[in-house]
Amino acid sequence: MFKNTKAFSGYSVNDIGKAKTFYHGILGLDIQDGIEGILKINISGSNPIILYPKPNHEPATFTVLNFPTPNVEKTVADLKAKGVTFESYDYPDFKTDEDNIFRGGGPLIAWFKDPAGNILSVVGE
């Protein structure tokens, strides 16, 4: 039924202005204003991601958006230089290192939050 559909993803934020500043100004993504306060994020080779304002927004407790990168360490350092704070995890089988990067098997990955508290990541390609 949906095999040939151009599906897209979306999630809520509590402040579209802060989202614009973060996603465009910090992350460098192309954004476009949509109807009724919606923000469209255009990522090359992908369908757009829709951010919609929600007054009673509650941040996602899981990763909503992953950014593949060939060099996680450099990407993390570059984002930290722009003021992005990365998450730190310290569980028995799930720990990030001093650079906030998970190196526990599989691709390297580091998590951070948008201004609305939604969890995003950079992940090794």
Image (cartoon, rainbow, N blue to C red):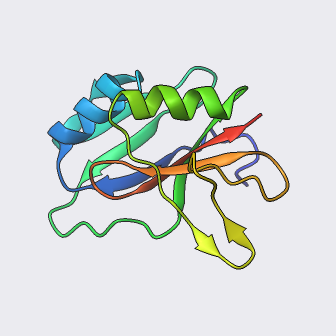
Above or below: residue 109 compared with residue 63 = above
Tell me, yes or no, if residue 47 can be seen here.
Answer: no
Tell me, yes or no, if residue 85 can be seen here.
Answer: yes
* Front one among 77 and 36: 77
Instruction: Indicate left or right for 81 with 46 as reference.
Output: left
Instruction: Indicate left or right for 53 with 94 as reference.
Output: left
Residue name at image x 57 percent, y 45 percent: 99
Q: Position of residue 50 (x, y in %)?
A: 39, 42
Residue at the limit of the structure toward the right, as seen here:
105
Residue at the limit of the structure toward the front, as seen here:
98
Residue at the limit of the structure toward the bottom, as seen here:
92
Residue name at image x 64 percent, y 22 percent: 45
Instruction: Indicate left or right for 53 with 90 as reference.
Output: left
Q: The N terminus appears in which quarter of the rendering?
A: bottom right
Q: Position of residue 33 (x, y in %)?
A: 24, 28
Above or below: residue 118 compared with residue 27 = below
Q: Would you identify the image quadrant in which residue 104 lies?
A: bottom right
* Front one among 45 and 36: 45
* Front one among 78 and 113: 78
Above or below: residue 55 compared with residue 6 = below
Q: Would you identify the image quadrant in which residue 20 lies?
A: top left
Q: The C terminus appears in which quarter of the rendering?
A: top right
Q: Position of residue 89 (x, y in %)?
A: 56, 66
* Front one among 88 and 42: 88
Residue name at image x 79 percent, y 46 percent: 107
Q: Position of residue 82 (x, y in %)?
A: 35, 28
